[in-house]
Image (cartoon, rainbow, N blue to C red):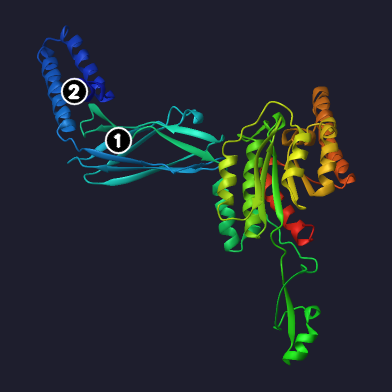
């Protein structure tokens, strides 16, 4: 009984065309009181409408295998990217149908009007593709897909429910990671802003002695090998490998600030993932440390094939905290974990000089043992305000305050440089490209 009611009551809907027909019948009945020649016409029209409703009901319910729908969702979604969701449709009715689709997407997207309309001829199939842009990492739950079918009469709609609730994790931006990998293979990294770094001299890591070919540096000629071989021989060198690259991510309240839908923490996580990938491609070892009011996750530097997946699994769950980072705990963790000189890329944010000064003693201690690169963010809103012309006294006041904060950011860079600490001040949207460029430049200058 419950299944019968669900099929013929819960999943049956009256369309606008039926209400228009009923409205016409009501109008005819009203006019028949005043016009005698309309006495039988309202009954005839109403009777025809009832017959058409039963015909429409028969058309919609005469076949159990009427339509087919399959929703294809990736096993994981990429945070801060457009992710393709596909809906495959197929019509098994013996007539052309109109279809409406409601897809129950996760509540995090706050979209309650996601409706797709289409038509399918007999035995026709079609794929509808739409995109979702997540701005938070975590687990997203998809509900069912509701399919509403109309026959050519269009008086009634039959609803079909497909699929079950499915939970999909949202990971850091692995689509950008894939984009970087593909561009690296095709040697087109300059298209996304990565610079070609001119190498100063060559690495001191010896590879082999080989025959001279046109274009080899004459300074690498091995005269002893040339004398023995009787042919011109040169020394070949390779980039120094197996350097340790650690991304240290600050999860304190300073990284909660939003920018274009993502928090600064999300930008730092996406950049860390791509930097780790580039480091592994360069045959360096990538590691990770997270810090808030206490030390969080620690992944020792390695270059195993599974290292990037380990980093992604940790970053996928990280969230901002509401306390200030304990830099002393970070320093102790780095001293205990990092057994050799490494490049430490510290992603944080300082909105005032006093905030930097509180952390500076610990940054100086870390810089004594490792090559430290501090990455922090420009406040793009204040920067745009400082560049706009002031139109009144209030505008002058706002512009002055904005310029003060922008100038203070530049002072922070100078303060870090004064203590021998590398720094990178960047807009959030340029973070990934700038960090990777800085890593490649340091490697080209043999700083690591």
Asked if the residues shown at circle 2 and circle 1 are in contact, with their CB atoms under 8 angstroms apart, the answer is no
Report the quarter where the N terminus lies.
top left
- Residue at 61% x, 61% y: name it: 188
Q: Nearer the viewer, residue 392 or 259?
A: 259
The residue that disc 2 covers is: 4
Does residue 354 lie above or below 370 as drawn?
A: above
Q: Is residue 61 left or right of residue 77?
A: left
The answer to whether residue 377 of the structure is visible from this angle is: no
Check the image and name the residue furthest to the right: 418
Q: Is residue 8 left or right of residue 439?
A: left
Q: Nearer the viewer, residue 7 or 234?
A: 234
The residue that disc 1 covers is: 99
Between disc 2 and disc 1, whose residue precedes? 2
The quarter of the picture where residue 49 lies is top left
Q: Position of residue 117 (x, y in %)?
A: 35, 36
The quarter of the picture where residue 408 lies is top right
Secondary structure at badge 2 equals helix
Q: Position of residue 395 (x, y in %)?
A: 80, 26
Check the image and name the residue furthest to the top: 33
**Alpha-carbon neighbours of circle 2 within 10 Å: few (<14), some, or many (≥20)?**
few
Check the image and name the residue furthest to the bottom: 230
- Residue at 32% x, 39% y: name it: 118
Secondary structure at badge 1 equals strand
Front: mark 2 or 1: 2
Does residue 395 lie above or below 443 as drawn?
A: above
Could you tell me how far apart the alpha carbons at marks 2 and 1 are, in whole angstroms?
A: 23 Å
Q: Is residue 120 left or right of residue 300?
A: left
**Alpha-carbon neighbours of circle 1 within 10 Å: few (<14), some, or many (≥20)?**
many
Q: Position of residue 156 (x, y in %)?
A: 23, 26
In the rendered structure, find residue 181 and report the number of the disc placed on it: none
Report the quarter where the C terminus lies.
bottom right
């Amino acid at each position: 009984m419950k299944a019968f009611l669900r099929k013929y009551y819960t999943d049956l809907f009256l369309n606008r065309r039926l209400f228009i027909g009923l409205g016409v019948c009501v109008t005819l009945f009203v006019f028949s009181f005043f016009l005698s020649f309309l006495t039988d016409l309202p009954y005839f029209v109403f009777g025809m409408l009832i017959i058409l409703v039963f015909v429409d009901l028969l058309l919609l319910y005469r076949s159990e295998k009427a339509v087919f729908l399959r929703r294809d969702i990736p096993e994981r979604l990429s945070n801060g990217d457009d992710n393709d969701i596909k809906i495959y449709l197929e019509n098994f009715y013996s007539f052309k149908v109109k279809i409406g689709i409601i897809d129950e997407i996760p509540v995090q997207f706050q979209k309650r009007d996601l409706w797709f309309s289409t038509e399918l001829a007999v035995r026709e199939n079609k794929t509808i593709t739409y995109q979702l842009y997540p701005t938070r990492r975590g687990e997203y739950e998809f509900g069912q897909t509701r399919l509403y079918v109309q026959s050519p009469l269009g008086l009634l709609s039959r609803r079909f429910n497909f699929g079950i609730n499915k939970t999909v994790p949202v990971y850091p931006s692995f689509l950008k990671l894939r984009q970087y990998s593909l561009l690296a293979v095709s040697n087109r990294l300059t298209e996304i802003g990565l610079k070609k770094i001119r190498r100063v001299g060559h690495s001191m890591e010896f590879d082999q002695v080989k025959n001279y070919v046109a274009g080899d540096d004459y300074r690498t000629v091995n005269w002893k090998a040339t004398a023995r071989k009787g042919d011109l021989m040169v020394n070949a060198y390779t980039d120094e490998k197996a350097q340790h690259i650690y991304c240290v991510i600050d999860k304190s309240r300073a990284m909660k600030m939003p920018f274009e839908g993502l928090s600064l923490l999300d930008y730092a996580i996406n950049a860390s993932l791509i930097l780790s990938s580039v480091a592994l491609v360069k045959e360096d070892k990538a590691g990770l440390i997270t810090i808030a009011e206490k030390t969080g996750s620690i992944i020792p530097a390695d270059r195993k094939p599974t290292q990037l997946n380990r980093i992604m699994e940790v970053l996928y769950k990280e969230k901002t905290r509401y306390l200030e980072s304990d830099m002393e705990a970070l320093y102790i963790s780095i001293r205990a974990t990092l057994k050799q000189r490494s490049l430490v890329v510290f992603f944080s944010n300082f909105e005032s000089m006093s905030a930097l000064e509180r952390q500076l003693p610990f940054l100086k201690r870390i810089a004594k043992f490792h090559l430290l690169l501090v990455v922090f963010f420009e406040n793009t809103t204040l920067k745009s305000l400082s560049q706009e012309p002031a139109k009144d006294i209030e505008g002058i006041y706002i512009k002055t305050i904005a310029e003060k904060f922008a100038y203070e950011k530049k002072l922070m860079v100078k303060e870090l440089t004064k203590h021998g600490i590398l720094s990178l001040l960047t807009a959030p949207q340029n973070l990934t490209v700038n960090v990777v460029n800085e890593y490649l430049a340091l490697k080209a200058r043999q700083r690591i």
